[in-house]
Image (tube, coloured by chain):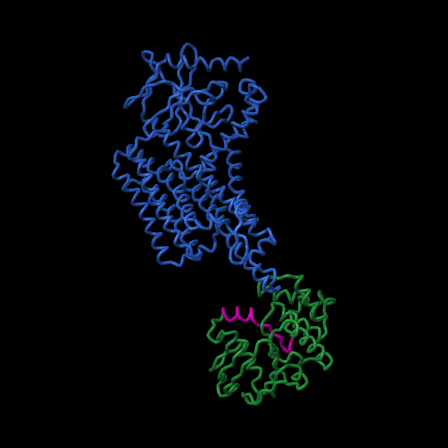
Amino acid sequence: MIYEALIIGLKEGFKLGIVWLVFYSYLALNNKKHLLKAFYSAIVVSFLLSAAVFFIQHDMILKDAISGFISVSLAVFFISSAAALYQASGVNMLYPFQGQVPVSDESGQSTYPLFLKKWAESIKHFIVFTASVIFFAPDIAGSIIFLKELSVMKQDALMTFFSALTGYLLVLMLFIVIIRYFRTVAIGGFFSLPQILLFLAIVKLLGGGIKGFAELSLMPSVQRGFMKLAHDFIHQIFVFLMVPDHPLLTITAWNFIGFFFGSSFASIASLLIFLMLPFTFIYYSLVKVPGASLFDKEGISEKTGAQKRKIKSMLLSDRRKKAVPVFLFVFLILFSWFSEKGGDAQMVYNPKPKPVVVENGVVIIPISDPSMNLMDGRLHKFTLSHDGKTIRLLIIRKAEDALSVCLDACEICPYDPEGYGQIDIDLICVYCNTPIPLESVGDAGGCNPIPLTFSVDERFVKIDIGEILKKFEAVKIIEFKEAK
Amino acid sequence: MSLIEVRDVIKEYDTAHALRGVNTEIEKGQWINIIGPSGSGKSTLLNIISGLDAPTKGDVIIDSVNINVLKEDDMARFRREKMGFIFQQSHLIPYLSAVENVMLAQYFHSMADEKEAAEALGRVGLSHRLTHRPSQLSGGEQQRVCIARALINSPQILLADEPTGNLDRENTKVILELLRKLHAEEHFTIVLVTHDPFVSQWGQRILSMEDGRIISDQRL
């Protein structure tokens, strides 16, 4: 049994199981179980779409695309949840449609437009199907890519996929037993549409990572995304002001500015963004008094005081009940953020460079020796002396079977500090705190480390000294400017 | 149309027979007074109609629901929704004000609403006594708070067990006039137990009991 694959199987199985449980309970309670057909169809389609990933030759572009798709689907569910909450607060977001095609039901009240009413059931099935595919397909595809890479590393594809399938089916069987033999309908009482959508976003956030153990959740990539956003935003301000920020500002200044795109700030800021919606839910459920429009829906304007109180009490009780899962989400986010990835994201790993020698114009570095392994996913640094210059190199595993070799410097920042450190799996510029996603290490330009052309065989990484010196020319100029 | 049906109700306590096969129907919106001497079974019948006590045999059907088959929680909910009570003793919470005592009944029904509770006390003529505690109110005023408390949840049935038993004639008259006014306005059904012939004349129907049986049924 391959442990890593088993865990991935368990994780994906749990995601499907918990979503199925909540959705099933919600539909059963609201007499809408017929919509489960669309849900089940979406699961099958998601597996078929994902299976295609197994058979096509994948590369970083595909992996990035799937990773991006997962992040987009997280955003879709998160934003949809806010929209559904807004609708539930009494503002009818479908009103523009109603205004176009006014129709009435038996009681003479304006209701959904005719074209929506006619196709209402089909539209509901379509929405459930599409949302489920958007939710599940990228995650399953991402997991299959991870398993494929893992199988290459373990050199046992059959056992890798068997382990994952075992984990998947084990969890799924557990949920089948829970749904079949326990009275799960009551769970549905804690959810309405906004809570369901928020729940999907939270499940995606906590279990949407596709990099195996390195990223079981999406939190590190959310933090990195925020760091990158803050970095680009601040740089764009300098560009707008036509200030050459990197050469002009000292490291002290960057230490202040860099705080805003540093990991600590990103961790807290992105956490606040994620908690904003749950807190809005809690405010809406527990603090805000229902408006008159909400009671009008219940048709109680003509009823006695006791009847009004009873309906109001039931509404408030229902809202309090539906705040319970939101409190749970807040707890889960906080717990996961600080216990798992949030803490790690703040620690910068910056190893001491190891000296290497040049033999016949070539720098030769062993892929593995008793003191290190270049394929371990950690940042490795080396230093060499040539004509009185001290040149630092960095090497990091970019994919399961690929290395990136770069100068430990970019074309913009001064060379004097230590170049790059590593946060979690990605790099970060020690001088200006710019986060460099692992996927982009090896790409030339901007804040990225300057990539080097190299060759690799089973035992060694080889870099031509001419290539190193040529690329180091760019670094030297910056070092001179800073010295002035 | 009958709101309350009492069918062959027997109540036995060991060797004592409190009710010996009582049958009657009470119409919706009717004010019925049950009279009889001590030990005739009138309070037992009231308690069985309210579901506070269970018959040894027989059924009580209220609004088409056989209350004898309801579980304890369902009975409590049914009572909360359909019935209001007034007893001889006020049973007001001594450390709560008049309005808070009424709000307590709202709270157990659904949720408290101070404005509505104050209005209810206003209807029984106690607008000026909202914040007074029971000990600061006269016996008649306390019973008026009890009426407000009993009616605050708009019950279909008001069950009153000797509501004027502790009052002098003047206050008794005030309470009965108030009940008459509210009954005319809100059309609830009143089942009132009394041994006082003066009180029994205020309703629309008198049920006389003796030794656990109905001995006469008189419409006024």
Q: Is residue A308 visible?
A: yes
Task: Between residue B34 and residue A482, name the one nearer to us.
Answer: B34
Q: Is residue A407 above or below residue B205?
A: above
Does the magenta portion include A434? Answer: no
Query: x%, y% of residue A316?
Result: 56, 56
Q: Position of residue A455 (x, y in %)?
A: 32, 19
When the figure is inspected, residue A265 is found, relative to residue A386, above or below; the finding is below
Residue at image position (26%, 33%) is A155
**A239 over A339 or under it: above or below:** above
A145 on left or right of A69: left
Of all residues, the one furthest to the top in this rendering is A387
| Chain identifier for the green-coloured part of the image | B
Q: In which quarter of the image is residue B187?
A: bottom right
Q: Which residue occupies the foreground of this view, A166 or B208?
A: B208
Q: Which of A93 and B188 is in front in this view?
A: A93
Q: Where is A408 relative to A208, above or below?
A: above
Residue drawn at the location 59% of the way across and 61% of the way down: A308
Please indicate whether residue A258 sits to the left or right of residue B142 in the image: left
Query: Is residue B82 within the magenta segment?
Result: yes
Q: Where residue A60 sits in the image (x, y, percent)?
A: 36, 29
**Does residue A86 appear in this view?**
no
Does A185 sit left or right of B118 as displayed? Answer: left
Chain whose colour in the figure is blue? A
Q: How many labels does the image show?
A: 0
Q: Which residue is painted at 48% across and 85% down in the image?
A: B14
Pinpoint residue A222: horizontal percent, then vertical percent.
47, 36
Q: Quadrant of the C terminus of chain A?
A: top right
Q: What stretch is highlighted in magenta?
A: B73-89
Q: In the rendered view of the protein, which quadrant contains the N terminus of chain A?
A: top left
